[in-house]
Image (cartoon, grey):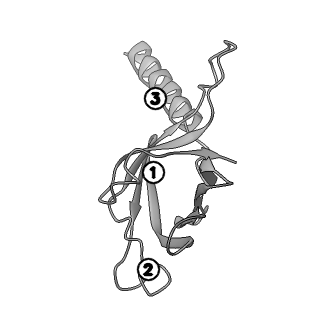
Amino acid sequence: MLMIIRIVFLFLFVNIGVSYGQTYPIAGTYKLETGDPATHNHVYTLILEENGRFNFHSHSDNKKGIPQIVDLYGRGTWTAKGKLITLKTDKTQDLNDTFSLDLDGSKARFVSKHPRDTSDRIVKTRLQFYDSDIFWVKTKALFKQ
């Protein structure tokens, strides 16, 4: 009986260690630049703060567009469950004339090289969006700075 109790405690101790060992440094600044700066450039920036808040900025500079420069902003809270990130926007507090992007329900996956991966493979740490009500956000991959 004593042996079974020791095995159970050992099992719990190992599981607790594994759980704490799988936290990911998700908070930070993520950015994607697309296009040609000479003609049409897009810059997407997402800042995930340690306190659970986020700020999103989309900057479009189309030299032949009307208007030429378009800036869109969004903000709200973010949560992480494992490697899945969910953005939430409170329509009463987070949306106004400046912050007009409603990213509520947008979901992304945190992608990074596993610490135990000893290969020479290069994996850029990024957030890969896979679900959003905003069509141009749905497939974006923003890279950690």
Q: Residue furthest left?
A: 133
Look at the image and tell me in which quarter the N terminus lies: top left
Question: What is the x, y in percent for residue 75?
Answer: 49, 72
Q: Considering the numbered disc 3 on the image, is that residue within a helix, a strand or a loop?
A: helix
Pointer 3: residues within 10 angstroms few (<14), some, or many (20+)?
few
Distance from disc 1 to disc 2, alpha carbons, whole Å, reads 19 Å
Report x, y in % for residue 53.
53, 68
Q: Is residue 99 left or right of residue 68?
A: left
When the figure is inspected, residue 42 is found, relative to residue 5, above or below; the finding is below
What count of labels does the image hold? Answer: 3
- Judging by the rendered image, the residue that carries numbered circle 1 is 80
Q: Mark 3 belongs to which amino acid?
A: Leu
1 vs 2, front mark: 2
- Which element type, helix, strand or loop, lies under badge 1? strand
Q: Which of marks 3 and 2 precedes in the sequence?
A: 3
User: Which residue: 63% across, 19% down?
Assistant: 116
Q: Position of residue 129 (x, y in %)?
A: 42, 46
Residue at image mark 2: 94
Label 1: few (<14), some (14–19) or many (≥20) C-alpha neighbours in 10 Å: some
Q: Is residue 105 above or below residue 142?
A: below
Residue that label 3 marks: 12
Helix, strand or loop for disc 2: loop
Q: Residue at x 41, y 23 (%)?
A: 8
- Mark 2 is surrounded, within 10 Å at the Cα level, by few (under 14), some (14 to 19) or many (20 or more) other residues, namely some
- Name the image quarter holding residue 63: bottom right
